[in-house]
Amino acid sequence: MENYTEEKAHICKECGYGTDIKSNLTKHIKIHTGEKPYKCEQCDYRTASKSTLDTHMAKHTGEKPYVCGECGFRTGYKSHLASHMKAHTGEKPHQCDYCDYSSVRKRDLDAHLAKHTGVKPYLCWQCGYRTADRSSLRKHVKIHTGELHHRCQLCEYSTARKGDLDRHMVQHTGVKPYMCGKCEYTTDNQSNLTKHIKMIHKKV
């Protein structure tokens, strides 16, 4: 078990991190040196850990070996499965210090905290866009890199986000697939439906 204590056999001189396993210290030191010897052969991704590279490769291969025994959800990432399982147990360990909000994933709490603090630590170096959510920044950067994977089949529109394409398609089809189960409200956007239910039906 690793921690930050001098009781461990191998100690990082930079920050005091300690471990009983020498190879763990070797991996840890790369955080300070910035060394990333493991490179993906299919993209520019580099990492300090072979196990992290193996996990990354699931993006290219589509392999999803981790399966939820409750509902069949599949993922290429063990950590994603662990987070997913909390949805079945109802566990939300990440609690906001300012309100009653809690979340399954820490990154969701970090994004939520921006509502209270206004802090948006993730910055796009190309245009100055800021966000409280790392995944939102990753999606945004695709605008600059040209990775607009979601393309409209009826016109020249393309986007990095599937949700944006879904909203765009309403212009062509008029279809609003998200329907309220309590009234006749329909929308092209899942978040709009969620807001509708909270604002209209939870007051009743």
Image (cartoon, rainbow, N blue to C red):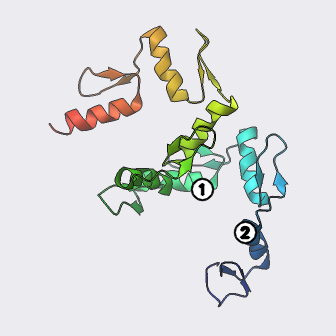
Label located before the other in sequence (1 or 2)? 2
Q: Is residue 163 left or right of residue 43?
A: left
When asked about the image quadrant of residue 44, the answer is top right
Amino acid type for the residue under numbered disc 1: Ser
The residue lying at 75 percent from left, 39 percent from top is: 60
**How far is mark 1 from mark 2, CA to CA?**
24 Å
Say which residue label 2 marks. 32
178 and 27: which is toward the camera: 27
Amino acid type for the residue under numbered disc 2: His
Q: Is residue 170 left or right of residue 9?
A: left
Secondary structure under tag 1 reads helix
**Which of label 1 and label 2 is nearer to you?**
2
* Residue 160, image x, y percentages: 60, 29
Say which residue label 1 marks. 79
179 and 142: which is toward the camera: 142
70 and 148: which is toward the camera: 148
* Residue 171, image x, y percentages: 45, 11
Q: Classify 80 as above or below 15.
A: above
Q: Residues within 10 Å of mark 2 (few under 14, many from 20)?
A: few
